[in-house]
Image: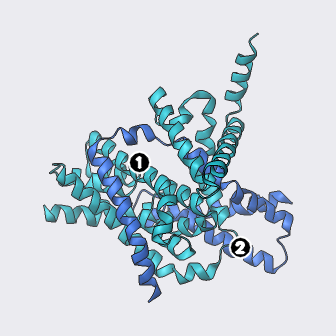
Chain colours: A cyan, B blue
Amino acid sequence: MNPLEILDSILIKNGIITAFLVVGIIIWFSYFLSEKLTKGKFHGSAIAIIISLILAYFGGYLTGGEKGLADIEIFSGLAVLGGAMFRDFAIVATAYGVDTSELRRAGKVGVLSLFIGVILSFAVGAIIASLFGYQDPVDITTIGAGTVTFLVGPVTGTALGASSEIMALSIAAGLVKSILVMVATPLMAPYVGLNNPKSAMIFGGLMGTNSGVAAGLAAVDPKLVPYGAMTATFYTGLGCLLAPSVLFLLIRFLH
Amino acid sequence: MVIYGVALLALCFITGLFLGELLGRLIGIEANLGGVGIAMLLLIGLSAYLKKKILLPPITEKGITFWSAIYIPIVVAMAAKQNVFSALDAGGVALVSGFLAVFISFLLIPVLTKVGKK
């Protein structure tokens, strides 16, 4: 009877509970670092997100899986706790107590930022793809779509019949974007005026990546989360609408 | 009771996702169009209505505010399950386009904030 084996099997069997414990420890340690090293200036949740991303890197490095740290069996509960279901449920809960006049006031510019955000990210992806030597309009469109979000990439690629390497590349572009938004938002926020509901709505519309926006705003000011999430939630849908249709025709026309 | 708050939240969530999915199908895309946003608007509207009718006591509210407070831990768990390794391993096109898209978008935030002021 090995006590470590027993513990191991309990941790694995009760995955989500283990995840609560793990996340609790990460957050406690992060707030400790935030207090000791930065006197609370760099937000504890920003540090927690960065530590988690680093752990996710090692998870991927060690297991070769796609779910970061959650591919290590005793941490598998993180995939459930951090999955889309709980994430979206909690995002909806943050809307409780939202100031509706703020939503109305920034509504129009929020919608505008959505269109600009999707088209801009697509254009950047498409231009970089052609600079790297991709010539086929299907490839260029799929990579551009992946830069919109890692969901729009494969949806567009499937619709246009792109090869699986191009699809993988487009997913990677979306992943880079989403992870970068998580890390860069707390650093950039003071310089771009991301400190009020209106700029949060614009931020959500421009970036669009649900996970990036969710984590980015959590690390700046949790009160801003519902405003950013409100616009970001329409982004992937808009991307799926525009990329395989209008934007693909545009790329083919330009070619 | 706490469960009433959680159930209200669940009702808004399911209804929102359903409407978002329906909206997507209607215009012919394979994605949920704004389901989470619709759910948020439903929660804002319904909770305001119930509050007016004095049907939302503090204990029921707790069922909603708990999930709102557990949001950051969920986001930390979400960060831990990202495919960071393949994002960094992806090669030039993905890294450069992802980086530029984020950077330019950040620069546009102050520009658009000003547009809205006029």
Which chain does the numbered disc 1 sit on? A
Question: How far, Cα to Cα, is label 1 from label 2?
Answer: 36 Å
Decide if residue B69 is on the left or right side of residue A58. Answer: right
**Residue A227, quarter of the rendered image:** bottom right
Decide if residue A137 is on the left or right side of residue A176. Answer: left
**Residue B8, quarter of the rendered image:** bottom right
Mark 1 vs mark 2: in front: 1
Q: Can residue B49 be seen in this view?
A: yes
The disc labelled 1 sits on which kind of residue?
A: Leu
Nearest the camera: A190 or B63? A190
Q: Position of residue A165 (x, y in %)?
A: 28, 39
Circles 1, 2 touching at the beta carbon (< 8 Å): no
Q: Mark 1 points at which residue?
A: A175
Mark identifier at residue B46: 2
Q: Residue at x 73, y 22 (%)?
A: A7
Q: Residue at x 41, y 65 (%)?
A: B106
Determine crowd level at label 1: few under 14, some 14-19, many 20+ residues with C-alpha closer than 10 A.
many
Decide if residue B43 is on the left or right side of residue B19. Answer: right
